Amino acid sequence: MNRAPQQMPGAVFFVGAGPGSPDLITVRGRDLIARAGAILYAGSLVDEAATRWAPAGCVLRDSKDMTLEQMSEWLIEQSRQHATVVRLQTGDPALYGALIELVQPLDAAGVAIEVVPGVSSAMASAAAAVESLTLPEVTQTVIFTRVEGRTPMPAGESLVELARHRSTLCIFLSITLLHKVEAALQEAGWPSDAPMLVVHKASWPGHQRVLRGTVATIKSLCREAGIVSQAMVIASPTLGARQWPDLARSKLYDPSFTHRYRRASVPTESA
Ligand code: SAH
């Protein structure tokens, strides 16, 4: 069918599919898939969410063998034929997802777009291991980063520099670069026995694996377990807190703390 672009203005929705388990997509994302005329999905991690909820007759295309130009052309073309076109991405589209590179050509073509957030694999990994990425008086900061591979790191963002903050580090795209992670953490002064966590295929029923080690041991543990892809690496002073006997408590729920919704029920301790 040869329609002019303005005749049937479809929109492209960039939907976060979540970390892998098909039921960790948002309700909004699932609803969009259920009425999509075409879906471009990012490889094997999200195909199940796409196929499980796509309507009969929906055009499904895996983007793993496509260049960025081919992807944007495909999305533009499909948006001329369907009211709802979905670009389905792992986790959240705002993290390591080439979002803006795809949005720009759609903007240039006058195609309306919208982004639907998703559960990032960083969050699914913390959940899998029952860990909190922030703890009072331990760290109140989380850094999402990666180790330098073929994509260079901007100035000031080497893992050594980031690790000096001693905050939580969620390290994406780096499972094959654990030697660099170990070297950077040690150079930044983390002790060799500082706890580390690797979660492979977080949230995937029957496939998820949680490995606990230390700065010194995590690389060999992963090698022995054969984990070479789809893994989140977390280094944090909060790891293992479930077993700590002397946890500092959150002020929000502290009986001596008054806030907008609750008055203190015991007097504030003076220091
Ligand atoms: N936008 C995605 C990240 C894409 S980059 C998100 O928000 O999660 C791909 C990297 O994400 C992988 O190299 C791995 O580090 C991580 N990743 C994606 N899915 C994962 C999963 N189910 N379990 C663990 N790590 C995962």
Image (cartoon, helix red, strand yellow):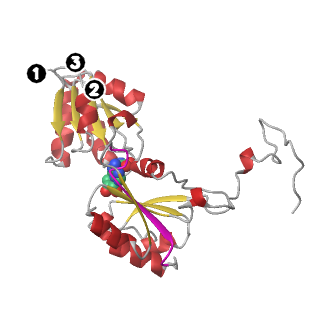
Observer-nearest of 67 and 167: 167
Q: CA distance from mark 1 to mark 3?
A: 10 Å
Reading the image, the residue beneath label 3 is 7
Farthest residue toward the left?
A: 1
User: Is ligand 1 closer than 8 angstroms to the Cβ of mark 2?
Assistant: no
Reading the image, the residue beneath label 1 is 2
Is 170 one of the magenta-colored residues? no
Q: Residue at x 77, y 35 (%)?
A: 261
Residue 269 placement (x, y as % from top left): 87, 56
Residue 89 has which mark?
Answer: none
Residue 174 placement (x, y as % from top left): 33, 64
Marks 1/2 in contact by CB < 8 Å: the verdict is no
The residue type indicated by label 1 comes to: Asn
Residue 252 placement (x, y as % from top left): 72, 46
Q: Residue at x 30, y 49 (%)?
A: 98
Position of residue 224 relative to residue 43, above or below, is: below
Which stretch is magenta? 192-204
Q: Residue at x 32, y 60 (%)?
A: 173
Q: Is residue 41 left or right of residue 193?
A: left
**Image quadrant containing the N terminus:** top left
The residue type indicated by label 3 comes to: Gln
Q: Is residue 49 visible?
A: yes
